Amino acid sequence: MLKGLAWAGLAVVCWMPLFSVAKRTLPYVDAYALGSLRYAIGVAVFVALLVAVEGRKALRYDGRFAGAALFGLIGITGFNLFVWIGLSFTLPEHASIILALQTPLIALGAWLTRGTRPPRFTLGCVAVAIAGVLLVVTRGDLARALADIAAGGALLGDLLVLLGAVAWVIYTLSAARFRAWSPLRFTVLTCIPGAFGLATANVLAVAVGAASVPSAGAIAGVAWQILYFSVGTVVLGVLAFNNANRHLGPLNTMLMMNLVPIGVFGIEAALGRSFTAVELAGALIVVGALVANNLYLRGVSTRR
């Protein structure tokens, strides 16, 4: 438990500034290039780390390449494309509170894939959390928000971030299929195909005119941000998350990740962002519902 909490705490610290930094980096390096650069550097460090810790034989897929590639493409490629493209439309705090929905999505995913129906209390908490997210992203004005989608505004970005959250949930649940691998090996062997997926998407986007190749000057101008994305959020963040997931399980790990949106709201406030009462209320509702559900599940487990 203590190891799991330590790993989860490291992931929270690594990911808490992510959305605020990314939002301010995207004007210089677009979503496709950001994902590609982030994982090109991160995977190089990962491979060196895996070889140093477990030896060259750990780079072998042992007949499991197809599964690792599939979940790497969903979790790494899918998450990055949906979230970074979505973030270019929406706000950092909105993206972080939407990603907090991964906790109830884990419960629903386990229901769909394993037939484990969540308790009624959990389903109620899921409904409350979703309502809280809707308050945050619509600011209490659903009609305006729906019109915003047609105009390619913030709610369109919110929907893309939600797809990214679903992709990460699938990736998180897939770790149970690779228990014979260490968290480090699982991370590296899924990140490699995921990084190739990002590079391929980047090339295709440039070919059709949906993205551009950043200049050397643009990359140099955000060099420390790219270093943070690569080492801080990919190498340390993803590795810490997968280790936490192994020790604590998906539900408890995702509960810890609810500290991320709280941190993002704090960072944005420190940078001068003001929030409406509806946004703050929605955020508190989401976090409160998720914490209540976790405490309930802990009580059920203790009684058993």
Image (spheres, grey):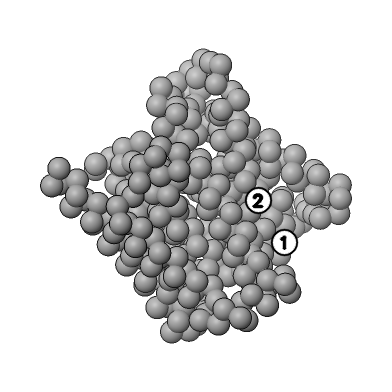
84 or 232, nearer to the observer: 84
Residue under pointer 2? 81
Q: Residue at x 55, y 47 (%)?
A: 167
Residue 183 visible in this rendered orientation of the protein: no
Q: Residue at x 73, y 74 (%)?
A: 151
Q: What amino acid is at disc 2?
A: Leu
Residue 8 in percent (x, y) is at 36, 47
| As drawn, 87 above or below 220 | below
Residue under pointer 1? 28
Quarter holding residue 137: bottom right
Quarter holding residue 179: top left
Residue 235 in percent (x, y) is at 50, 41
Q: Residue at x 36, y 36 (%)?
A: 246
Pointer 1: residues within 10 angstroms few (<14), some, or many (20+)? Answer: some
How far apart marks 2 and 1 lie (CA) works out to 17 Å
- Judged from this view, the residue extending furthest toward the right is 208
119 or 191, nearer to the observer: 119
Quarter holding residue 148: bottom right
Name the side, left or right, on which 126 lies relative to 120.
Answer: right
Q: Earlier in the sequence, mark 2 or mark 1?
A: 1
89 or 290, nearer to the observer: 290
| As drawn, 292 above or below 110 | below
**Mark nearer the viewer, 2 or 1:** 2
| As drawn, 59 above or below 240 | above
Residue 275 in percent (x, y) is at 48, 81
Name the side, left or right, on which 88 lies relative to 119.
Answer: right
Residue 301 in percent (x, y) is at 19, 45
Q: What amino acid is at disc 1?
A: Tyr
Local SS, label 1: loop
Quadrant containing the N terminus in the rendered view:
top left
29 or 156, nearer to the observer: 156
Local SS, label 2: helix
